Image: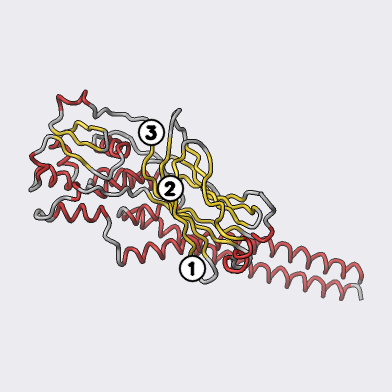
Amino acid sequence: MKSLEKLMLAVTAETKEARNQHEQQFNELSDKLQSIETSISKLSKSNEDPPKSDDDSMRKAIDESTVQTNNQANVASEKRFKLNHVFKNVKKFKENVKHYSEKEVHYNAKWSICVKRLGNQLIFYTYCEPIDPSTKWSFLREYEHEDVDKTQNDAINPDTFCFQKKCGTGNDEFVKWEEMGTWCLVDGNLTVETNLTIIETTGLGKKKIRKFDESQKDVSDVILVVGITKFYVSKMFLASQSSVFKALLFGNFKESKQSVVTLNGIDPNDFHYFLEILYGESAIDEFNVEDIARLADMYDAPTAVRKCEEFLLKDSKKTVEMKLTIASRYHLENLEEKCMSEITAKLSKNADCRTQFDFRGMLFCVSIFLFIIWSLWMFQ
């Protein structure tokens, strides 16, 4: 009988440990899927009533010949992204020990956020690590970082910084330690978000394949000026690739009569890769696909849109969440449909796995119970 009691205790302990392990795995997967669902919800709301973006304004200006083109205004860059992370068991943080989020790749760099306890403060940093940089490189960026408190109110701290080496920058007085424990923690966890806007970059990016400099002067009939860079191109070719360029260069705009046209609010490097795609080069990679997709959507260039979507569908290693964000923002319908299908499948699989585990666990317990009854009967 004592042997049977020991067996029962051992089986019970093993079953409990296995269940705890599976529950932990399920919870981790559920948290990740919940994050994706939240992103989908935000994207859906933004699509229901989308704000009038600079790109939309550009299209409207092109469609309405009586309206002055957006090209004359200084349009702000749209190189924006968000980092967010849930730091767990924050009250157990030791003094001056850094805690990092996972690294995410955005615009040719790996980005992460970090918090640490220092005295009576919780300090916040944003870290930037360029991918394959040149000898000299820089990121000029604006950011707002925030902690989400129990009432979902945010503490926003805007700032601007220029990265010129691998480092972190942030706020040494992000939140007081006592206030954090009272207002910011949910079940001992702290949710931190930072919204970043890349204003300008130098010394980064894929090696350029095709030249659009003065060496192309004899086969061009217009110069497009982006920042301080001049692009010697063909009006007819651009018009055949983009309805926006067709209207701008051949329509009822003063630019149609100019030999030099300035394009505002565009990164010269992004525009170079965009032109390379229009001219048939394989210029898309993991780090510039979003920039090219933005310009392809902005200038209504179907070839570039298709190339970006094909890359994201077949070759990109970005997460489903990141792909869905790009697809929704730049109207990549096939990609958006595939992402939604993958997410739905994951949610369904998660539910099925939990059901199967509960059923198998029940069968296992019943089997053990029957074995114990049989053993008791045999040893009577």
Residue 17: x percent and y percent? Answer: 73, 62
**Residue found at x 41% / y 59%:** 341
Comes first in the chain, label 2 or label 1: 1
Q: Is residue 178 above or below residue 286?
A: below
Comes first in the chain, label 3 or label 2: 2
User: Label 3 belongs to which residue?
Assistant: 206
**Residue found at x 14% / y 45%:** 248
Residue 153: which disc? Answer: 1
Q: Is residue 146 above or below residue 103?
A: below
Residue 252: x percent and y percent? Answer: 7, 48
What is the three-letter code of the residue carrying label 1? Answer: Asn
To which quarter of the image does residue 209 belong? top left
Looking at the figure, which quarter contains the C terminus? bottom right
The foreground one among 314 and 32 is 32
Looking at the figure, which quarter contains the N terminus? bottom right
Residue 266: x percent and y percent? Answer: 28, 43
Mark 2 and 1 residues: CB-CB less than 8 Å, in contact? no
Residue 244: x percent and y percent? Answer: 17, 47
Position of 267 with respect to 62 (left or right) is right
Residue 160: which disc? Answer: 2
Characterize the local packing of mark 2: few (<14), some (14-19) or many (20 or more) Cα atoms within 10 angstroms. Answer: some
Residue depth check, mark 3 versus mark 2: number of the one nearer the observer? 2
Residue 271: which disc? Answer: none
What is the three-letter code of the residue carrying label 3? Answer: Lys
